[in-house]
Image: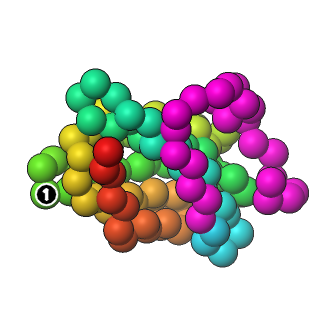
Amino acid sequence: ELAPYTPVFGERSAPSAAQQLFYEADLNALDLQIRPHKEGFAVAGQILGPCEPGEVELSGVDGSTQGRFGEDGEFDLAPVAAGNYKLLIRLPAVEIEVPELTLTM
């Protein structure tokens, strides 16, 4: 765990086939989960650290999906097809970008 942040354990503690990735950006960290889905992949996550409500966007050549998150920092995006994507998280004072996120079987 990345102390002193407090993760929400509802999704993170259950066993699953999810791939879990961690990123750090200034005062924040990103816990990203990628799960196989019948339509491709489901992407969910949580911003750890100082967090205010914001937006998240996953965009790629074959389309994009967007969502919002609250003060808990959790988000769950609509499933997307396999491919290469960019993940952009918009907080009021900062943007966090994962420029290359490859979703493959």
Residue 65, horizontal then vertical, whole percent: 27, 42
42 on left or right of 26? left
- Closer to the camera in the image, 95 or 1: 1
Over which residues does the magenta segment extend?
1-23
* Residue 55, placed above or below residue 16: below
Which residue is at a point 52% across and 38% down the rendered structure image? Answer: 18
| Residue 93 seen in the figure | yes
Q: Is mark 1 on a helix, strand or loop?
A: loop
* Residue 26, placed above or below residue 85: below
Q: Which residue lies furthest to the left in this view?
A: 62
Residue 99, horizontal then vertical, whole percent: 36, 70
2 on left or right of 56? right
Residue indicated by mark 1: 61
Residue 29 occupies quadrant: bottom right
Quadrant where the image shows the C terminus: top left
Residue 3 occupies quadrant: bottom right
| Residue 53 seen in the figure | no
Quadrant where the image shows the N terminus: bottom right
Q: Which colour scheme is used?
A: rainbow
Give yes or no for residue 49 being in the magenta stretch.
no
Which residue is at a point 33% across and 51% down the rendered structure image? Answer: 103
Residue 39, horizontal then vertical, whole percent: 24, 29
Which residue is at a point 49% across and 66% down the rendered structure image? Answer: 96
- Closer to the camera in the image, 97 or 84: 84
Q: Which residue lies furthest to the front in this view?
A: 105
Majority secondary structure of the magenta segment?
loop
Density class for disc 1 (Cα within 10 Å; few <14, some 14-19, many ≥20) is few
